[in-house]
């Protein structure tokens, strides 16, 4: 701000510069017109004005260069500037040129009119007249001097002054000098002018006289009047010379001088005519050049000022077009253009505000969307949404996990395309697609799904989506994996059945057994041997069968009753080795162990875990075809899933394996592939494993035989489970 | 033979060059000296004045010409720039009187000299004798002095209309170069 204040305004600088140039122009023109004091400064003034012109020319040149550069760059407002500058220049150049042309014409004619042939002749004549008058006087003077010289003839050197004095008394008054060839003064008679020393003639005159020719000449004297000098040699004696200096009568001298000075002045003027025209033309041209250049320069300046807001506006518009709404244009004026610029500023401000608002609401929407996505991602239910042309819009993490699919890569795919890229979804997608197409309302369905990890029961809910105008906007499908739930329900149902059966069946069994034994006891004595044998066989069968039935019922109640487990730290590897040791090679099974050495301990009831292992080993034994040597691989390792650590026990036999149609229900009671057994073995195994917070599954995916995978949480993770198990 | 021809042509060339550079017009100082005379040192100099056609024409048409003679005397110093101890400028005007068909020199003091011809005037003007320059005591023994002399036509004293032309026309640049010589004690 301070710097700005120190700097004089541009207009003031221009004004000062112009004033200076104008003053110098005026001085120059005055100097041209009269030979006053200014005449001495003329050259300087010409120089200053020329420099001023050069300066202005430079300024104009710089401006033209700037303009051309702007034009080349296609800068905003450059075309307008060019047009205005051109117009301005034309407008100032045209009248100035006309004035200049006529001024030059006038000047030439005017100066020529000063000179006239008649005046020329008159001046020549006047001079000749003067010369003639003076010539007569000169001749007289010469004659008189010659007479005195004659009078001095034959006078001895000592007599010359006396003789000269005598002769002078008769003659006109003047200064007479007699001198020798060597310049020695022999006699001198001064005039009234009071000169003591004679005025010697110049060498050229002496030379002339020495050659015998008399000299007479007109000169200016000390008083700036005219005098006539005559030099003659004294007759008879050529070693002496007489010089006479006579003044011209004052009147005649004055007249002659006036004529001469007028003539000289006129001659000078005539001679200088060309130069004078040139000087005037120079002055005039300088004036024209200066004013033109100044006009053009000021045109540039003012046009730049006028065009500046237009340029700003163009720049601003360009900036806005490029999306920069922050640009504010400087408002320097109070006129219409200033108002325009202000309006532009207001407009950009409003646009910027609107853009900010839009951005803000977009951010809000984004935030909401992100929030919804987070909620969706953390839902345990799978969610798939489709647009109106049944293309996948979104899918959450749970959908991926439940259906073992990668929907993220298939966003935008139709149901058909989804099936193509992920064939295991084919059945499910067909059902879901049909439902979505055909049903306009909300629907619910339990759909079995055969995934890579076995059969899953899905509970699907489909909801068509409608826009505010009732137009279909697609649909959303929410599904839950209810496999575990259904299995639990089944299991609970079975427990109930088992308890009832145990209760209902066990009660009549004892009276049946007792009655049969009583029958045998009472009747065997009274019957024949053959009949008694039949009775004995029959009652034994009854008792045996009842016994078997009791066993079965006990097994049922065993399965059904809530178990009590005693948890303690157990090293699974040790436990496996102990169990395997009980099966010698004669048992028909060969074991191969691959146990992870540094396996962490688990909290488990060793008795129950042993039962699990026994059940599974027995299952394998029983499944073996007769005469085939069985083999079982048992492998332990540490597994991790969803940040939980488990000890994984994998048991793999070389038996016939589980048929696929039974695979998903193998852990339910009475689902068995064998001819003997209760059909509760695997159900009990599953129950025990689940009571330990673990899981068991059948991996029928690879190789032959059955492969069971048991997972038991490691010790520190069992803590939570333990509390749970205690309650059970 | 060929060699002699070469020598001749060289000589002719040299003469032509000399002719072109000096013989046309321009002032030339042929000789200058400062001699002690009583209480002062006086300047004696021979100057060859050759006016250009345009200058003579102007003179004959009544334009007075002003000549300037500059004399400078410097004490030479080995340790520093030379010290100017005397600087003098003398002007005199020459003009033509058509009435008496004579030429006149007007000295600065107003003294006039008339001559019947221009040659006589130039001869007289070219011989500077006994111009008293500086007091003798300004020249100190054992110091070395250098005097320089220049004669020039004063364009600024020409009539105003003639000046712009004179400034740009070479025929008006008649001044001699500086003539330098050592001043004897």
Image: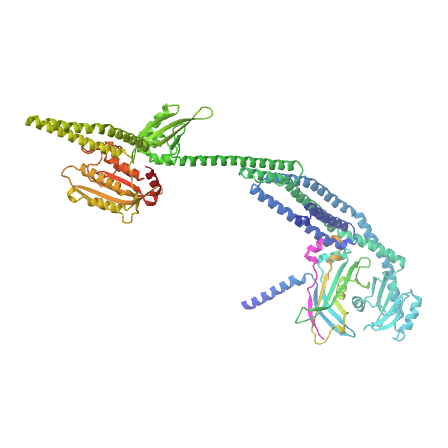
Where residue A598 appears, as percent x and y from the top left, is: 29, 49
Q: Which of A537 and A357 is in front in this view?
A: A537
Q: Answer left or right for A63 relative to A260.
A: left
Q: Residue at x 32, y 45 (%)?
A: A715
Direction from residue A395 to residue A649 in the image, left or right: left
- Residue A339, quarter of the rendered image: top right
Taking the image as drawn, is residue B164 in sight? yes
Residue A294: percent from the left, percent from the top?
68, 45
Q: On the rendered image, what quadrant is the C terminus of chain B found in? A: bottom right
For this orientation, the residue located farthest to the left is A529
Q: Is residue A242 above or below residue A628?
A: below
Q: Does A153 appear above or below B57?
A: below
Image quarter (top left, top right, bottom left or bottom right) of the N terminus of chain B: bottom right
Residue A277 visible at all? no
Q: Which residue is drawn at 81% across and 49% down?
A: A119
Q: Which residue is drawn at 77% across and 62% down?
A: B92
Q: Residue A693: which quarter of the image?
A: top left
Rendering quarter of residue A642: top left
Could you tell me residue A313's position as x and y percent?
A: 60, 38
Q: In this view, does B3 lie above or below A580?
A: below
Q: In this view, does A54 lie above or below A689?
A: below
Q: Name the one closer to the observer, A574 or B153.
A: A574
Q: Which of A726 and A367 is in front in this view?
A: A726
Residue A311 percent coordinates (x, y): 60, 40
Tell me where the magenta segment starts and ends, as one range: B164-185
A454 or A81: which is nearer to us?
A454
């Amino acid at each position: 701000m301070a710097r700005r204040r120190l700097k004089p305004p541009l207009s003031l600088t221009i004004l000062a510069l112009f004033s200076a140039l104008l003053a110098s122009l005026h001085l120059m023109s005055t100097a041209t017109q009269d030979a006053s004091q200014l005449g001495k400064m003329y050259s300087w003034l010409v120089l200053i004005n020329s420099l001023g012109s050069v300066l202005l020319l430079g300024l104009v040149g710089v401006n033209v260069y700037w303009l051309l550069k702007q034009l080349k760059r296609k800068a905003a407002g450059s075309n307008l500037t060019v047009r205005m500058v051109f117009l301005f220049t034309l407008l100032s150049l045209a009248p100035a040129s006309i004035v200049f042309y006529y001024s030059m014409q006038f000047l030439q004619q005017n100066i020529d009119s000063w000179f006239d042939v008649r005046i020329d002749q008159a001046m020549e004549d006047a001079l000749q007249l003067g010369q003639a008058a003076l010539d007569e006087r000169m001749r007289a003077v010469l004659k008189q001097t010659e007479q005195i010289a004659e009078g001095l003839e034959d006078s001895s050197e000592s007599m010359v002054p006396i003789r000269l004095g005598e002769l002078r008394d008769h003659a006109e008054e003047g200064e007479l000098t007699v001198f020798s060839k060597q310049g020695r003064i022999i006699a001198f008679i001064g005039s009234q002018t009071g000169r003591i020393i004679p005025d010697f003639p110049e060498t050229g005159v002496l030379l002339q006289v020495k050659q015998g020719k008399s000299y007479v000449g007109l000169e200016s004297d000390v008083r700036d009047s005219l005098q006539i000098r005559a030099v003659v040699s004294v007759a008879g004696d050529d070693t002496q010379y007489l010089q006479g200096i006579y003044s011209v009568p004052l009147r005649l001298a004055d007249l002659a001088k006036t004529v001469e000075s007028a003539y000289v002045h006129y001659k000078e003027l005539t001679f200088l005519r060309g130069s004078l025209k040139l000087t005037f033309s120079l002055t005039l041209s300088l004036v024209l050049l200066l004013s033109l250049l100044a006009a053009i320069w000021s045109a540039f300046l003012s046009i730049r000022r006028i065009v500046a807001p237009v340029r700003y506006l163009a720049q601003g518009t360009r900036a806005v077009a490029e999306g920069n709404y922050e640009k504010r244009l400087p408002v320097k004026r109070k006129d219409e253009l200033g108002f325009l610029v202000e309006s532009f500023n207001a407009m950009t401000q409003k646009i910027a505000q609107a853009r900010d608002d839009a951005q803000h609401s977009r951010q809000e929407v984004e935030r909401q969307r992100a929030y919804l996505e987070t909620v969706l991602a953390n839902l345990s239910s799978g969610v798939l949404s489709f647009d109106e042309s049944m293309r996948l819009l979104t899918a959450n993490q749970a959908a991926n996990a439940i259906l073992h699919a990668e929907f993220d890569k298939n966003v935008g795919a139709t149901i058909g395309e989804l099936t193509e890229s992920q064939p295991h979804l084919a059945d499910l997608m067909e059902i879901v697609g049909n439902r979505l197409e055909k049903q306009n309302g909300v629907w619910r369905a339990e759909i079995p799904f055969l995934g890579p990890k076995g059969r899953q029961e899905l509970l699907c809910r489909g909801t068509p989506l409608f826009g505010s105008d009732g137009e279909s906007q697609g649909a959303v499908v929410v599904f839950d994996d209810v496999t575990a739930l259904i299995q639990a329900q089944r299991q609970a149902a079975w427990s109930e059945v088992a308890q009832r059966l145990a209760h209902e069946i066990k009660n009549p069994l004892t009276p049946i057994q007792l009655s049969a034994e009583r029958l045998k006891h009472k009747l065997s004595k009274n019957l024949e041997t053959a009949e008694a044998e039949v009775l004995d066989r029959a009652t034994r069968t009854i008792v045996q069968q009842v016994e078997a039935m009791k066993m079965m019922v006990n097994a049922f109640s065993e399965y059904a009753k809530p178990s009590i487990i005693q948890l303690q730290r157990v090293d699974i590897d040790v436990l496996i080795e102990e169990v395997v040791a009980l099966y010698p090679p004669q048992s028909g099974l060969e074991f191969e162990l691959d146990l992870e050495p540094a396996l962490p301990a688990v909290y488990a009831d060793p008795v129950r875990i042993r039962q699990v292992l026994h059940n599974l080993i027995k299952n394998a034994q029983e499944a073996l075809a007769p005469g085939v040597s069985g083999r079982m691989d048992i492998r332990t390792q540490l597994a991790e899933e969803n940040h939980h650590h488990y000890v994984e026990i994998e048991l793999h036999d070389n038996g016939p394996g589980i048929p696929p149609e039974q695979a998903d229900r193998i852990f339910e009671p009475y689902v068995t592939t064998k001819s003997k057994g209760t059909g509760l073995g695997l159900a009990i195994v599953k129950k025990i494993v689940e009571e330990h917070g673990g899981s068991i599954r059948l991996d029928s995916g690879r190789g032959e035989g059955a492969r069971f995978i048991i997972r038991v949480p490691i010790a520190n993770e069992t803590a939570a489970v333990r509390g749970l198990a205690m309650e059970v | 033979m060929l060699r002699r021809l070469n020598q001749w042509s060289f000589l002719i060339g040299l003469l032509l060059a000399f002719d072109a550079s000096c013989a046309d017009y321009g002032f030339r100082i042929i000789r200058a000296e400062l001699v002690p005379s009583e209480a002062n040192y006086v300047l004696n100099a021979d100057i060859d004045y050759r006016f250009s056609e345009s200058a003579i024409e102007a003179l004959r048409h009544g334009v007075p010409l002003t000549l300037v003679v500059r004399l400078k005397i410097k004490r030479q110093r080995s340790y520093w720039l030379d010290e100017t101890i005397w600087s003098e400028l003398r002007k005199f005007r020459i003009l033509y009187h058509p009435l008496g068909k004579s030429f006149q020199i007007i000295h600065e003091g107003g003294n006039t000299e008339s001559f019947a011809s221009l040659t006589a005037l130039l001869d007289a003007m070219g011989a500077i004798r006994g111009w008293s320059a500086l007091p003798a005591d300004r020249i100190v023994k054992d110091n070395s002095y250098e005097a320089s002399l220049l004669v020039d036509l004063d364009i600024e004293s020409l009539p105003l209309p003639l000046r712009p032309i004179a400034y740009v026309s070479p025929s008006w640049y008649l001044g001699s170069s500086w003539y330098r010589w050592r001043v004897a004690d």
